Image (tube, rainbow, N blue to C red):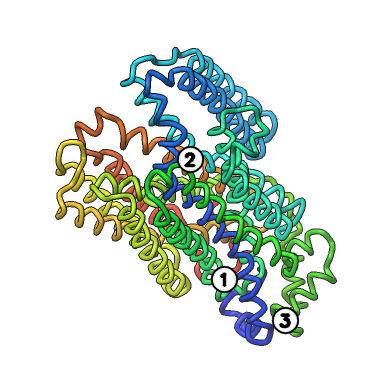
Amino acid sequence: MAFIDTSSKSTSGSFQKGNPMYIVMLTLVATLGGLLFGYDTAVVNGAEKSLVEFYIARITDPANFDYAVKIITQYKIMMALVLFLVFGIISGQIVKLLGKKKGFIAGGIILTILTVWIISFISKAIPTDAEALKGSVDTIKGFVIASALIGCVIGGSVAGFISRALGRKNGLFIAAVAFFISAIGAWKPEAFNIFGTLDVYSFVIYRIIGGIGVGLASMISPMYIAEIAPANIRGKLVSFNQFAIIFGMLVIYFVNYFIAKQGNDQWLVTDGWRLMFLSGAIPAGIFILLLFFVPETPRFLVLNGQEDKALKVLKKIAGDKDASVILEEIKGTLHEANAPWLSYGFLVIFVGIMLSVFQQFVGINVVLYYAGNIFRNMGASTDSSLLQTIIVGSVNLAFTVVAIMTVDKFGRKPLMIIGSIGMGISMFALGFTFFMGQTGGMLTPLQGYAALAFMLIYTAAFAMSWGPVCWVLLSEIFPNSIRAAMSIAVAAQWIANWIVSLTFPMMNDNIWLTNQFNHGFSYWIYGVMGILSAVFVWKMVPETKGKTLEAMEEIWLKKK
């Protein structure tokens, strides 16, 4: 929110004279969007092996060749549609960024290249031998497991428009409903298959719907918190959203573990995974109910000429004395609410996009989505792999708390750089541990413990830096008049996430790469990204500690 800088006398008193409990309660409700973000994206961790066995693995059996033809054909069609949709979104962002003339030219070039590639992709013959079909299993597996991320790209891209047109609160409500529908549909995709596809792709579509909710929440939840938080604790409160994301992941890790304990491996393949997805309906329903009791943010109310309502909310947040001052400050910085996205130069857009891309290219969601798979590569059983996943989630949560407690004390850049270096070194070490393992990637017990230690160090480094702090920076670096431009950074983040999640099974399960590197190759790629991310933050990202959202305008104008 437009609270005065921390050096201002008004700011130091506004939180105390207002209602701190009210701010905390609003923050907790908004962070439920983050909790569902984590819950919905990590639920697939426990269900991944069962989904592959239930829907995909049998295509390598010659007796199921007709099914293999159908699943591969529909995969090609859905992938083509998804790529057109994603690149359509990218083209729309380019038009918004460059203007209609240049944007349409760039979009046309992208569309032409994409069309040529898709024609080649669809016309490629379906393999008939088991070895070639194994490659199709890995590819389709990546598509199904990462399907929610397609929705995340969509939701993240339209989040700016929805938050501006319908409001921050209504945007969160739409996200909550999407979460609920997804949980029900993914539970029984065959019962709710209204799409005319194979059941596996009915599941994919419902996961995409849930992903739309995640994409919306990923932008609007931290935006809502940033717009109701005083500047001197804004970093801490926005970081609570990341805490909620990690907490949601940890909760579903426990839920997955206890569901898996209710039956044997066969039960998990036929029924257990369904309950994992259905469980998400509970927090989604709670989120829907609580949103009826929170107000719209003062900044959005002022944008829409509802100054009286904005003042009432400000009085609850900041107290009667400072509410009017803050209202005038908000009004003074929203005079260019529809300014072109390049009003402050391309650098702010570039920094936002690269922060998002690096947050994913360091490989965190490989650990969070495929941890069970990674631990099984180490030789762990299904139950043990899920238990070890809980350990990873616990470390993630604990070090997120470290970030929350230090982000407003040490600043954003030092935490980001330290975290990048820690992640890079850990990923290189993890890759070498697998590389030195036995043929096929299996590790000795000692190597397994070392690999687990490196994963935990990596997770801790991410949790105290790029996890929460990246979202703090994204919520702070965009000036008020182009705040909707944050959507291009969020869209870039989800596209990068999708790319990483889609390609990891292809690299990790590829027979040639496994024979050469014993599952170590992909981790070296993420290690390189960790080091590059440290250099990027050091050279390109401004420190936002203690600065008001309004002050960011001056920073970017000077760099323009």
Q: Which residue is mark 2?
A: 146
Q: Amino acid at mark 3?
A: Asp
Which element is circle 1 on? helix
Whether 92 is drawn above or below 225: the answer is above
Answer left or right for 28 relative to 481.
left
The earlier-in-sequence mark between 1 and 3 is: 1
Residue plotted at (39% across, 31% down): 57
Q: Which residue is mark 3?
A: 322
Which tag is nearer the camera, tag 3 or tag 2? 2
The answer to whether mark 2 and mark 1 are in CB contact below 8 A is no
Q: Nearer the viewer, residue 94 or 64?
A: 64
Marks 1/3 in contact by CB < 8 Å: the verdict is no
Whole-angstrom CA distance, mark 1 to mark 3, is: 17 Å
**Quadrant, the N terminus:** bottom right
The mark nearer the N terminus, 2 or 1, is: 2
Question: Hey, which quadrant is residue 327 in on the image?
Answer: bottom right
| Residue corresponding to mark 1 | 234
Whole-percent x, y for residue 28 in the image: 60, 70
